Amino acid sequence: MYKLVVIGSSAGGIPLLQNILMALPKSYPLPIVIVSHLPSTSFSHLAQLLSRHCLLPVNTVFDKAEIIPGQVFIAPSGYHLLIETQTQFALSIDPPVQSVRPSIDVLFQSAAEVFEKQLIAVILSGANRDGVQGIATVKALGGLTIVLDPKFAEFNIMPKAVIQATEVEYIVNLEEIIALLQAVKE
């Protein structure tokens, strides 16, 4: 029984996120938490951009916000997003990790520590190594790991780095990622 989906993306990730969210039904049972590396000026509009392609509510997270099933949560620019408890987020201004804040590693590691085998972690397109440590933690604690096959990523450095570092469960195209997420039951 899964309780949370976390998705990490960077360069080339926005169209992929749009396609994933567009494919999920309004009745999708799990909260979905997204870290995407974008310039701070663009990032403030990511929730509005994604909400145009999604039947689920899409929100930018604020500190101590509640984690609500069936909603999409976006990490705010300039803050690391952490899962504090099964029902609450936390924001941090700790130093950047892999030169970025928010960091995929920080989100994935904190989510894995709280949700363990009830977590699904997805890595999409990206041009850096953020996510490598996070996926390793998710895998070590029993969560499900899914990575976009690098040949389908506009920028394949991130998915390649993750696959080289950790034996993930799925290395698949976007349609298969969508099918795996659609098949989830709470």
Image (spheres, helix red, strand yellow):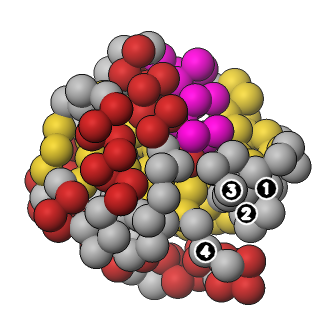
Tell me if label 2 and label 1 are in contact, CB under 8 Å.
Answer: yes
In depth, the one of 17 and 154 nearer the eye is 154
- Compared across the picture, whether 29 is left or right of 178 comes to right
- Count the marks: how many? 4
Location of residue 6 with respect to 111 vertically, above or below: below
Tell me: residue 100, above or below residue 92: below
**Does 58 appear in magenta?**
no
In depth, the one of 156 and 17 nearer the eye is 156
Q: Where on the picture, by quarter, is residue 11?
A: bottom left
> Which residue is labeled 3 in the image?
99
Residue matched to label 2: 76
The span picked out in magenta is 105-116
Figure quadrant of the N terminus: top left
Residue drawn 34% across and 32% down?
165
For the residues labelled 4 and 2, the Cα–Cα distance comes to: 10 Å
Amino acid on which disc 1 is placed: Tyr
Q: Residue at x 55, y 64 (%)?
A: 36
Residue at numbered disc 4: 38
Between circles 3 and 4, the one closer to the viewer is 3
Mark 4 or mark 2: whose residue is earlier in sequence: 4
Nearer the camera: disc 2 or disc 3:
3
- Which label belongs to residue 90? none
Quadrant location, the C terminus: top left
- Which residue is labeled 1 in the image? 79
Assess disc 2: are there few (<14), some (14-19) or many (≥20) residues with their C-alpha within 10 Å of its C-alpha: many
* Secondary structure at numbered mark 1: loop
